[in-house]
Image (cartoon, coloured by chain):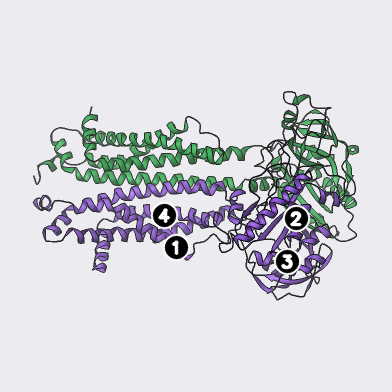
Amino acid sequence: MFLYYIRLSLLSYKRNPILSSLMVLAIAIGVGAYMVIFTLNYYMGGDPIPHKSSQLYHVQFDYGDPAIADFEPPPQLTYIDATALLRATAGHPRTASSKFVSVMEPPGDELRPFYVNGRGNSSDFFAMFDVPFQYGAGWDRRADDTQQQVIVLSDELNERLFGGADSVGQNVVLDGLNFTVSGVLGAWSPAPKFYDVNNNSFEPIEEAYIPWSLVVGQEMQRAGNTNCWKAFEGNSFQAFLNAECAWIQFWVELNTADEQAQYLDFINNYAAEQKQLGRMPMQIEKRLYDVNEWLAYNEVQPDETRILTALATMLLAVCLLNTVGLLLSKFLGKSSEIGVRMALGANRGSLFIQHVIEAGVIGAIGGILGLGVAALGLEGIKVLLDDLIVTDWMQLNLTVAFITVALAIVSTIVAGIYPIWRACNVNPASHLKTQ
Amino acid sequence: MEIGPIFRALMRNRLGVILIAAQIAFTLTVIVNAVYIIVDRSERMARPSGTDETNLFFINSIGYGENYNEAVITAEDLNMIRQLPGVVSATVINAIPVSGSGSSSPMSTVAGRLEGIVPTALYTADEQALATLGVELVSGRDFTATDVSYRNDQIARGDNEIIISMALAEALFPGEGSQAVGRTIYDVNQNASVIIGLVAKLQAPWPEAPFLENSMLVPEVYDDNSSMYLIRTEPERRDQLMVAVEERLASSGHPRILRNNRSLEETKAESYRLDSVMSTILVSVIGTLMFITAMGIVGLAVFSINRRRKQIGTRRALGATRFDILRYFLLENLMISSVGVTTGAVLAIAFNLFLVQNFDMPRIDWYYAPVGMLVLLVLGQLAVIGPASSASRISPALATRSV
């Protein structure tokens, strides 16, 4: 019976091709456009590390000076606080981290030296953020403490330097220093780059990773946001380190509610102590943020996707209203056919089901076409964005494809309920008369 | 007039009216706000940086190795670049306007006071800075070669002489910005900077910064093995010189990496890429919506005309002209659309308030909603003209058949 109804639906489509195609088009465009924005939101506004996002915490301190108008406490730590927290939180996985830029001198004579974007981080960084490795591994905490010259390469950099081969144990020269490769990352492109929200959260990952202690120890060229709110005392590098300048991200992994409560106490006590020493004159409400809170607090999701969500919802609404109208036309146009079938003994229930299926078929065709619209839309946005942000994730996956078709079918049926009800309530007699 | 009968006829088909009116209302909401966002973004993108944008490019040279002597090499490079035919002037600078990266420092009119400090973009360059950027000096004097100090991380920035943008002068000395020359301002480290010149306009490196127009130029060259050369060319010579300069620098034999060989136009377009992407998406949303709405109007009009073929025939038989029939359906559409655009205008303003509150955008100008209403009324009339004129061709003889 189901198949028979489907065949009837297709017949009905053919009988009224323009009206039906208009409907399919409206649904395809409405659902397709909505899914483009849904995909953008799914990633840009979604949870980047779902299974751990409520265990990873970033620390915020009461930075700034009330005398400075409109000063927002910067969302990073000063060197003094980052090193203090690294020491005091050794019982948990934790990492300080910051960006640097430097010159990489490849082994051999074939490649010319080139510029790399790097990240200094503590050994726990890789495990905390589930960073995938294809060869080797990170380093241990002893390497952090001894400023051991070990390096982890991104997949891309390893391709460039070693043609993608297992390079663990090889030497490379970075910033004039000899580094030993300890590991090579697998494919990894977190979007947003939640562990560093200060420097364009949708840019590609860094190419090289070294112990964070080296960034300071070797006075590497720091990159990324540095925000100071007090004059330096002196002109040396040490004066910069001692200064009220926030430039370090600090994350800690706290697995249980107990640990979280204890850590919050610790952070609050630390801030109170610092206030007594005359530091941290601002007052903030919250000092510990989990991943999602941190992304929201730092407004990582671009305004654009939120505005577009609202607009796409209205576009979908217009398309569905359109479909209601067109279905109404279509089904009322079939009044005489329905009248005849009723006179021949069809009951309302089966007529209702037949038309629900007919609406569903139109929705399904619209949904499949909508997949095309969505794919085209995403491709278009990728072309427009070019290399502005990482767009690897910007594609239709199976979930999104399924949601698209389901959304199209369900919304068409919902749009069809009133037209179907009207169609099934015709008076058979009035339609038999004119035959 | 026929408004009475049309109204009564419409009241018998309320759902059809509501469907069309609601579509028009949503369409108006989206279109008005999308156009407003597009206009807002294009105004942002159109802000001039104050520089000779079309004739500027820059290239970054990063030296490496123990024996790299940046001071010597920079002088040599600049000398070479300045002698190339087609080059107007060249300078070594720390940051590029509207490129997205640079450095800033709060400035104050009283040493050591935090209240009333003004965030300021900091450009350091040599004495050819103004000539190269192409910014206009409105009072005071330009830098000379003897003003330029050379420093590195061992030498602190001391007291100096600076040139600032008019907007910064006005922010520091409200109401008397144009008399700022000769006055002294201070950075957080309490270094005194004497203002020797004012330029009409020079934007900061960050298009989204609230202090976009506040910038200062310090005659200083900083030695950290990395030099950014900014080069101004004669008209039409830029692209050719971009290649020539990079080739010359690459073949100079020094151990260095050349990066970011870009025109100012390109880097500006890049900085505003999100704005232009947003505008393009919105334009396609507007086009799609107008198409869908028009199709919806056509679809429902065809349906309602088909249902009333006999009535139309009867009216024709009773003496109505073709034009009467055409006018009937145009008027009917106008009445439905009016309901739609009126509701839509309210929705559009409500949605705009939502945008204003959540995304701190400016309020919509008053004429957006009325213009949008007019556009959609015209769209409705255009959409219905086809079905209405085919209705007007219904033969009066239809009235006599199959009664």
Q: Identify the element where label 4 is drawn.
A: helix
Q: Identify the element where label 3 is drawn.
A: loop
Name the kind of residue labelled 4 in the image.
Val
- The quadrant in which the N terminus of chain A is found is bottom left
**Mark 3 or mark 2: which comes first in sequence?**
2
Q: Chain of mark 4?
A: A
Gap in Å between the C-alphas at discs 4 and 3?
45 Å
**Mark 4 or mark 3: which comes first in sequence?**
4
Expressed as whole percent of the image width and height from the top left, the position of residue B97 reads 72, 42
Between residue B178 and residue A258, name the one nearer to us: A258
Mark 2, residue position: A82
Q: Residue at x 34, y 48 (%)?
A: A322
Q: Which mark is residue B121?
A: none
Q: Nearer the viewer, mark 3 or mark 1?
A: 3
Q: Which mark is residue A123?
A: 3
Q: Chain of mark 3?
A: A
Name the kind of residue labelled 1 in the image.
Ala
Gap in Å between the C-alphas at discs 4 and 1?
11 Å
Figure check: A406 above or below A228? below
- Chain displayed in purple: A
Mark 1, residue position: A401
- Chain displayed in green: B
Mark 4 crowd level (few <14, some 14–19, many ≥20, 10 Å Cα) = many
Q: Quadrant of residue B135?
A: top right
**Mark 3 or mark 1: which comes first in sequence?**
3
Q: Is residue A276 left or right of residue A42?
A: right
Name the kind of residue labelled 3 in the image.
Ser
